[in-house]
Image (cartoon, rainbow, N blue to C red):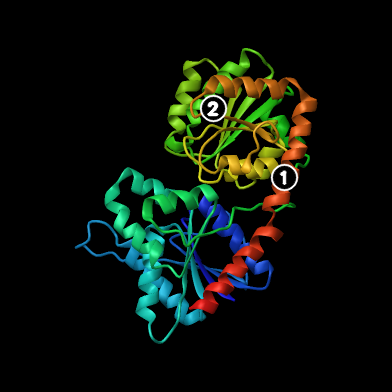
């Protein structure tokens, strides 16, 4: 198949999933065309089967804001014609499904271009924050030729808000070879020169990820386990607040802020425990990647996280903001290496049993084929 994929190219779960999906499809003989404003974060190598088409913005003095939705639709239509696309797979309803539908309609009747929309969660929370987006978001979902969601939680939320349930759940996935615990001696020496145990957090540092809670948790754990470091991987609007709080608590020198990193598996392999105290997670991709690297997860019991993390078996779940319990759970794992290692091994077993690529990617291919058969 010739498949067009559109994602937000920024550092976030949907961009990661879309990029990895494209690479996995290409490895199975399909040709994937990424259509976006910039090269997606995880898309590090282009070839004959993985191509990139940059959306060029029009500069026109009449427009106070550049009309990205229209520019994207125009590019989608052009790529569909020149590359003879079989379908468009867009990640996020707003604005990508709207652009895809515009492209589809503009090509009729000369070219058939089914549009598949994958919901990642912000589609829903956006409407929750501003109900004025509900009609256009629902239009994008309903008018898509096929809709998938990354968790049962997200499917149920979509049904409740939009009264639409023709949704197929296809979860996020992890590559067993790319995400496995492996020696990272040099990195460990850099992050923990005195042999400290490492608590790690990976996110885009948005408020919804509650990265400041990681520092609060770490400060409490330090009262019980002293030889530890906190490694914060990622960047975003909350980073300054996190660093400020670490200084206020007098623990900044025990924290490492390493910014955005492409080799997430290396940082997970260096860590003992992952902190994921998010206010909302539609799936919890960071948790899945950590589990595949045999890292137990301390997370909030929200959204789709309980579908990924089994409380007491592959990690521990707490209510949002319960930094006291999260700190206790983290200290318990850090103090007992045998318990931690056993939990880590079980975490990898469950991650691969449910979410490895050779289980999930065929579900996408089957879904593509079913949509093509219908349309």
C-alpha span from label 2 to label 1 = 25 Å
- Camera-side residue: 236 or 89? 89
Which residue, given by chain and number where applicable, does mark 2 sit on?
A: 214
Work out whether 106 lies above or below 70: below
The residue that appears at 30% across and 53% down in the rendered structure is: 133
Q: Are marks 2 and 1 in contact (CB under 8 Å)?
A: no
Work out whether 111 lies above or below 23: below
Is 6 positioned to the left or the right of 253 in the image?
left
Which quarter of the figure is the N terminus placed in?
A: bottom right
The location of residue 242, given as percent across then percent down, is 47, 27
Q: Earlier in the sequence, mark 2 or mark 1?
A: 2
The location of residue 335, given as percent across then percent down, is 73, 20
Q: Is residue 280 visible?
A: yes
Which residue, given by chain and number where applicable, does mark 1 sit on?
A: 350
- Camera-side residue: 120 or 289? 120
- Camera-side residue: 74 or 59? 74
The location of residue 194, given as percent across then percent down, is 73, 22
Work out whether 75 lies above or below 159: below
Image mark count:
2
The residue that appears at 68% across and 69% down in the rendered structure is: 28
The residue that appears at 61% across and 18% down in the rendered structure is: 221
Which residue is the extreme one toward the right? Answer: 338
Is 18 positioned to the left or the right of 187 in the image?
left
Residue 341, labelled with which disc? none
The location of residue 210, given as percent across then percent down, is 47, 32
Which image quadrant for residue 339?
A: top right
What is the secondary structure assignment of the residue under circle 1? helix
Q: Is residue 56 visible?
A: no
Which image quadrant for residue 367?
A: bottom right
What is the secondary structure assignment of the residue under circle 2? helix
């Amino acid at each position: 198949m010739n498949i067009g994929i559109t994602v937000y190219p920024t550092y976030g779960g949907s961009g990661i999933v879309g990029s990895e999906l494209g690479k996995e499809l290409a490895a199975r003989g399909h040709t994937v065309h990424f259509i976006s404003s910039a090269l997606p974060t995880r898309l590090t190598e282009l070839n004959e089967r993985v191509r990139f088409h940059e959306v060029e913005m029009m500069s026109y003095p009449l427009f106070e804001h550049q009309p990205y939705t229209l520019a994207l639709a125009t590019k989608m239509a052009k790529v569909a014609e020149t590359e003879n696309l079989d379908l468009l797979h867009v990640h996020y309803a707003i604005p990508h499904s709207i652009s895809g539908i515009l492209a589809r309609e503009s090509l009729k009747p000369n070219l058939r271009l089914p549009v598949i929309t994958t919901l990642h969660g912000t589609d829903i929370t956006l409407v929750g924050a501003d109900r004025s987006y509900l009609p256009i978001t629902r239009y994008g979902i309903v008018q898509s030729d096929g809709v998938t969601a990354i968790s049962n939680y997200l499917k149920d939320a979509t049904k409740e808000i939009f009264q639409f349930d023709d949704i197929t759940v296809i979860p996020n996935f992890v590559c067993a070879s790319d995400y496995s615990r492996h020696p990272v001696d040099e990195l460990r020496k850099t992050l923990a020169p005195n042999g400290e145990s490492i608590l790690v957090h990976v996110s885009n540092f948005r408020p919804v990820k509650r990265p400041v809670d990681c520092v609060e948790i770490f400060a409490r754990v330090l009262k019980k386990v002293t030889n530890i470091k906190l490694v914060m991987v990622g960047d975003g609007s909350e980073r300054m607040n996190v660093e400020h709080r670490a200084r206020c608590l007098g623990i900044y020198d025990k924290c490492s802020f390493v910014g955005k990193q492409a080799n997430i598996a290396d940082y997970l392999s260096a860590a003992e425990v992952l902190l994921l105290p998010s206010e909302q997670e539609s799936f919890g991709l960071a948790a899945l990647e950590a589990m595949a690297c045999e890292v137990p997860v301390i997370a909030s019991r929200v959204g789709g996280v309980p579908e990924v993390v089994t409380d007491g078996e592959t990690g521990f779940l707490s209510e949002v903001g319960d930094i006291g319990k999260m700190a206790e759970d983290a200290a318990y794992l850090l103090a007992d290496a045998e318990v931690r290692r056993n939990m880590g091994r079980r975490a990898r077993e469950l991650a691969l049993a449910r979410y490895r690529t050779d289980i999930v990617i065929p579900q996408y291919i089957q879904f593509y084929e079913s949509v093509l058969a219908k349309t």
